[in-house]
Image (tube, rainbow, N blue to C red):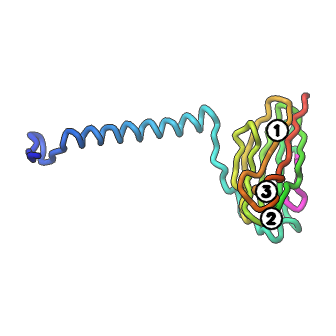
Amino acid sequence: MTVQASEHDGLHIDPYEKRWIMLSIILLIVFAAAVAVSAFAFGYQVPLPEQRVNPLTITESGPFANPGLRELAPGKYEAYIVAHIWSFTPNEIRVPAGSTVTFYVTSQDVQHGFLIQGTNVNAQVLPGYVSKLTYHFKKPGTYTFVCNEYCGLGHQAMYGRVIVEAP
Ligand code: CUA
């Protein structure tokens, strides 16, 4: 390989290297566009750790002491769900079709998961943290939610359902 000085400046970039640099820049643009499209067009959301809680006292005070559904306004709900070995409390929620439900999920003991089948609601559930996810239930039906993080012997029996009733 011969090293030549560029006519314009002192930096010489090998043509092959230049091609790889261009390809890397194009890939970065494609990946950034994919993230933007999934977030804005498909509504993918990162399950943010909403707040911290003490897993030892959640059953005594705060919203998780009385878990379940709260109606904020017509068609707008909050659902507080506690995951523990090996079930969810509550394990059944009923809302009318067209409702928007914000889920607040935390664990009382070990790491669990919270996935509502057929939706983009999917979060890791850790003791000490509250995972918050919102979903708009357009169609009536039964949406099963499962624990999708291995949490011990009874893991496969850990599920519940959201029943979306026809209005
Ligand atoms: Cu809880 Cu797996």
Q: Is residue 67 magenta?
A: yes
Magenta extent: 64-70
* Residue 122 position within the rendered picture, expressed as x and y whole percent measured from the top left: 70, 46
Instruction: Specify whether 10 is left or right of 46.
Output: left
Mark nearest the camera among 1 and 3 is: 3
Tell me if the residue at label 2 has its CB under 8 Å from ligand 1.
no
* Residue 141 position within the rendered picture, expressed as x and y whole percent measured from the top left: 86, 32
The first of marks 2 and 1 along the sequence is 2
Q: Residue at x 40, y 38 (%)?
A: 27
Residue type beneath disc 2: Gln
Instruction: Specify whether 38 is left or right of 129.
Output: left
Which residue is disc 3 drawn over? Answer: 155
Considering every residue shown, the one lying at the far front of the view is 153
Which residue is disc 2 drawn over? Answer: 108
Q: Is residue 54 above or below residue 30?
A: below
Q: Residues within 10 Å of mark 1 (few under 14, many from 20)?
A: some
Residue type beneath disc 3: His
Give the alpha-carbon distance from disc 2 to disc 1, as whole Å. Answer: 23 Å
